[in-house]
Image (spheres, rainbow, N blue to C red):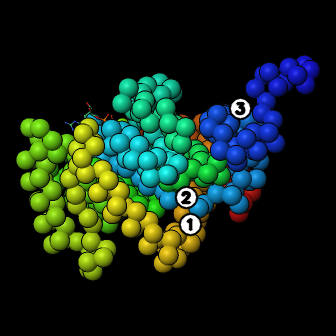
Amino acid sequence: MTRKGEQYDGAFDLESLESSLCSGDRRALARAITLIESKRADHQAQGTELLERLYPKSGHAFRLAVTGAPGVGKSTLIEALGLHLVDLGYRPAVLAIDPSSSNTGGALLGDKTRMEVLSRSESAFIRPSPSGDAVGGVAPRTREAMLLCEASGFDPIIVETVGVGQTETAVAELADSVLLLLAPGGGDELQGLKRGIVELADFVLINKADGRTKSTANILAADYSAALSILGRANDEERVQVQTCSALEGEGVAEAWRVIEQNMQYFVDSGERVMARANQARQWFWIEVKELLSSDIAQESALAIVMSELENDVAKGKLLPVVAARRLLKEYRAAHKLG
Ligand SMILES: Nc1nc2c(ncn2[C@@H]2O[C@H](COP(=O)(O)OP(=O)(O)OP(=O)(O)O)[C@@H](O)[C@H]2O)c(=O)[nH]1
Ligand SMILES: [Mg+2]
């Protein structure tokens, strides 16, 4: 195959991709994210090379996670917030992690998630990421995508993720601040508290404070404020802020941003960002080590039979998962003569 053919076949010209990306070209950024998300070995190698080159140019944006139950209005809020940010002169990037795609492998995004008005803005970048089967609702390559957005000059980076179980923890590890969005009618109204959100969320926003749900939203906000002031953190500055908004009508969005922005400023001025980046990098390293190790073990053909036997025994309840895992690791070490 000719070199031209290889290019056509999907090889990327890294140098021109890098320079276009760094000049803020949204198409180049989208292509770079496609590259790092690709499962092709040659793309993965190129993707890693690109990330290594861009790593020194990343890390300076504010990383905000927006989490909450399905349908509370995360995408609607992010669109309203994004438009407000553009008005203020920011260049926001939105990475929307779509859980519905885990079975299909492709993003099945509704109109709202596409954030059509915001996506028309030259100053904004929106990218849906299929979450795949990643633990915690964070797409496997969300961290890399975030770095690419930063290198491309986008700031802040907003990550939309559905709050299910472990998500908040996974998201808190990658974001500087976590905004928990709630809405009336969620059934168990104080659900966020139960999931330990006091430790994880920096802001609580009660959405849909409009029309028929306005009064319930206000009651919910008062309940949360009261509960958080009892359960909350020791000093006032660190206490979780509770506000109401209507993402649909754009009410309360600027007010919410004002609080987030203050927090963001403090984050930089106090030197907390430097510490947060160090922690995030450390956590990321261990996540990668675990992923690499488990995929290495899973690909070990000599262990295929042992692995499926152990898995079956675990599924039948005959063997404790932790015992099975230890046994597998022992076999792996023996196969590699690791003592
Ligand atoms: N009344 C009212 N409806 C809203 C508001 N914000 C969002 N909605 C509606 O709530 C529904 C869900 O909104 P989305 O923004 O898609 O919610 P989401 O949290 O992103 O949903 P998922 O991504 O599926 O988890 C849509 O029909 C919105 O129009 C609001 O402030 N007020
Ligand atoms: Mg959404």
* Residue depicted at x 51% and y 27%: 105
Q: Looking at the image, is mark 3 or mark 1 earlier in the sequence?
A: 3
Q: Which residue is mark 1?
A: 277
- Would you say the residues marked 2 and 3 are in contact, meaning their CB atoms lie under 8 Å apart? no
Q: How many marks?
A: 3
Lateral position of residue 108 relative to residue 219, left or right: right
**Disc 1 to disc 2, how far (Cα)?**
11 Å
Q: Is residue 263 above or below residue 87?
A: below
Q: Residue at x 26, y 38 (%)?
A: 248
Earlier sequence position, callout 1 versus callout 2: 2
Image quadrant assignment for residue 299: top right
Q: CA distance from mark 2 to mark 3?
A: 29 Å
Residue 178 placement (x, y as % from top left): 38, 58
Q: Which residue is mark 3?
A: 40
Q: Which mark is residue 36?
A: none
Q: Do we see residue 211 in this rendering?
A: yes
Relative to 207, 84 lies left or right: right
Q: Which residue is mark 2?
A: 61
Amino acid type shown at disc 2: Ala
To which quarter of the image does residue 300 belong? top right
Q: Residue furthest right?
A: 2
Q: Position of residue 123 (x, y in %)?
A: 54, 42
Nearer the observer, 120 or 322: 120
Assess disc 1: are there few (<14), some (14-19) or many (≥20) residues with their C-alpha within 10 Å of its C-alpha: some
